[in-house]
């Protein structure tokens, strides 16, 4: 039997810029407010090896990310830094490792119906400049790919959020042991998921 949508999980990492700008509470509040449940959280300074493994859990990440980057440049009428997708992602990965190990990060697992898509929607698109107002990145960041590339650094966009259910499963296992993820009930889950809303009236 297929698991209920309320059990879907996703990984969020508040990056060093989010921690340094004291936005941890604000970011958590955004996910809590919509009804997602925090089932795991920890603060750490990751190693470069752990970050490289995170970004390359998907064997296609290097090619796909490079191709998307090239397309993104062209769509804006700009010349990509290289025509080779793998050369582009090699640079992205180096800058990513430097950035993600610069200070503490907060890794979290969120659970709830459509958790992956909901978190992506609330977080906003990867580039802060093109993120909609009302999203975390759209409201709190003014960075862009163009500026980050010009400064030869990783784009500062506050948080990482898994891109798909499959990606979330791989990433959660990479960051958390099974015994670090809590199984518990929130009172609000009755309002969100109970079919008949039984038990409200005394």
Image (cartoon, rainbow, N blue to C red):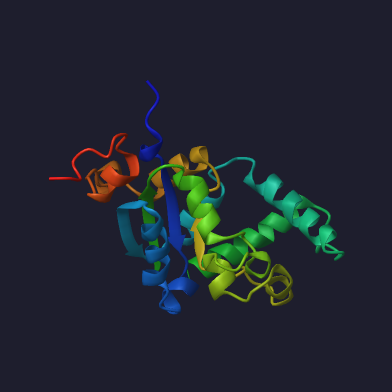
Front-most of 129 and 18? 129
Q: Residue at x 34, y 45 (%)?
A: 192
Front-most of 87 and 130? 130
Quarter of the N terminus within the rendering: top left
Residue 25 percent location from the top left of the image: 36, 70
In screen coordinates, is 158 left or right of 32? Answer: right
Residue closest to the far top: 1
Q: Is residue 119 above or below residue 194?
A: below
Q: Residue at x 57, y 74 (%)?
A: 141
Residue 52 percent location from the top left of the image: 53, 54
Residue closest to the far left: 202
In screen coordinates, is 105 left or right of 191? Answer: right
Residue closest to the far front: 201
Front-most of 59 and 179? 179
So how many labels did they put on this image?
Answer: 0
Corner quadrant of residue 134: bottom right
Q: Residue at x 80, y 61 (%)?
A: 73
Whether residue 39 is visible to the viewer of this picture, yes or no, is yes
Q: Residue at x 57, y 60 (%)?
A: 124
Residue 60 percent location from the top left of the image: 64, 41
Whether residue 52 is visible to the viewer of this picture, yes or no, is no
Corner quadrant of residue 202: top left
Residue 91 percent location from the top left of the image: 68, 62
In screen coordinates, is 176 left or right of 50? Answer: left
């Amino acid at each position: 039997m297929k698991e209920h949508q309320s059990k879907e999980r996703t990984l969020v990492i508040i990056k060093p810029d989010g921690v340094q700008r004291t936005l941890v509470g604000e970011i958590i509040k955004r996910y809590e407010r919509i009804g997602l449940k925090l089932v795991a959280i920890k603060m750490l300074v990751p190693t470069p090896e752990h970050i490289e493994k995170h970004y390359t859990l998907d064997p296609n990440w290097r090619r796909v990310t490079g191709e998307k980057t090239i397309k993104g440049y062209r769509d804006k009428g700009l010349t990509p830094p290289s025509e080779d997708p793998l050369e582009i992602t090699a640079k992205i990965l180096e800058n990513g490792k430097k950035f993600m190990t610069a200070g503490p990060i907060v890794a979290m697992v969120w659970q709830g119906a459509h958790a992956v898509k909901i978190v992506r929607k609330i977080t906003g698109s990867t580039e802060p400049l093109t993120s909609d107002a009302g999203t975390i990145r759209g409201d709190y960041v003014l960075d862009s790919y163009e500026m980050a590339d010009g400064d030869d650094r990783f784009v500062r966009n506050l948080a990482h959020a898994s891109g798909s259910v499959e990606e979330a499963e791989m990433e959660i296992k990479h960051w958390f042991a099974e015994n670090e993820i809590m199984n518990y009930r929130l009172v609000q889950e009755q309002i969100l998921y109970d079919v008949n809303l039984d038990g409200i009236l005394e």
